[in-house]
Amino acid sequence: MTAPDRIEEFLSAVKAAFMDSSLVRLKLGGYHGDEPELKSVEIKKIVVKGGERFSFTYRYKTRDIIKNFIQPEAIALLRSGLREAFRSGQLFTTTFDLMLERNGDKVRLKRSEVAGRDAPSTEHNRAKNRPLSETNKPYLQALGITGKDGVVRNDAQDKFRQINKMVEIFAPLIQAIPGDDLRILDMGAGKGYLDFALYDYLAQTAERPVEIVGVELRPALVTDGNATAAQSGFTGLRFEAGSIMDYDANGADAVIALHACDTATDDAIYKGISAGAALIAVAPCCHKQVRQQMEAGAPAPVLEGMLRHGIFLERQAEMVTDTLRALLLELNGYRTKVFEFVSDAHTPKNNLIVAEKDGRAGRDQAAILAQIAEIKAMFGVGQHYLEGLLQR
């Protein structure tokens, strides 16, 4: 049997396990492709609102990236990966394990039977114990999430789901920060949806003093937020008027920014890095600064056919902007992850960059700088706004 035939046999087993829900997990290892710092890919089956998907977790040296694919896309990626970039594939099912090893043009398959193994749940959006289990809180009504009866309003279901998901993500990260107390800054807090929910949850579970400050440019929102905090008895939550760049972030344990427009996200990242925050987490919104440079610059000729379409230009601008942000965070000693925090059915701006201070990250600075330079050159970007801030 030829090497391509063995790879196809492996892929047939993957497809069958996916279809009959016997897939436990799948891993590609031994990476020797062109993408710097990629170590392996782990794959599982999930069920989302749009149907069944393969969920790929790309494991990099200092970050993870998660992408979901329908079956034909996933199998095509697995096929090209096993033929060219990965030396091994490991398929684990409820009844057998199948190992693929590739050495040049030679491929070996080894199957072993197993018993008593259960498949993990595929429910990606399964019902969970939401952090906001009680909906009769004054702040939820003040924010327009619930009505006077304490029931979540129909037009606020998506917002309520987002808030719960963000608390579910942020609370464990924040609680893992060492120290006797916690100081959290929300840059561009807006109405403070996350701040109220996060404070409510942490005040009950953190077992140490918690302070959350929402920094907001619009004085009316600051006044409303402080009034609602006082009404709720949240003594450790307050809102302050001012711009992100003018605010003194020293002493912050965590800096977060949700949907701060365009370079305001970079302002928040810069403030977090400058303060030495243990955690920086941003959900970017708008990517105008890099897009304008891509339109005015000279991207690699091979990209011309793609970037002449506005929708593709916009998507590439988002990808390039946030990739450079992740790399610049790594350059400054942070381990980063980029992932979707809610389905795009609830908000199109659903990517989250999470960066945790880690002395091991960013050690190979020359390699990171080279990667940044290559990306900028390929897409015709002169300088990322965050670069300029960090060079001050």
Image: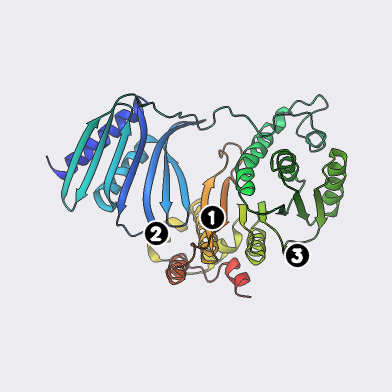
Under mark 1, the amino acid is Glu
Under mark 2, the amino acid is Glu
Under mark 3, the amino acid is Asp
> Mark on residue 248?
3
Q: Is residue 113 above or below residue 41?
A: above
- How far, Cα to Cα, is label 2 from label 1? 21 Å
> Mark on residue 170?
none
> Mark on residue 318?
1
Q: Is residue 285 in sight in this rendering?
A: no
Query: Mark 2 — residue?
Result: 37
Q: Is residue 272 above or below residue 16?
A: below
Element type where label 2 sits in the image: loop
What residue do we see at 45% from left, 44% from top? 67
Query: Is 300 in front, or is 247?
Result: 247
Name the side, left or right, on which 386 lies relative to 144.
left
> Mark 3 or 1, which is nearer the eye?
3
Element type where label 3 sits in the image: loop
Q: Mark 1 Cα within 10 Å, few/some/many (few <14, many 20+)?
A: some
Quarter assignment of residue 195:
top right
Quarter assignment of residue 193:
top right
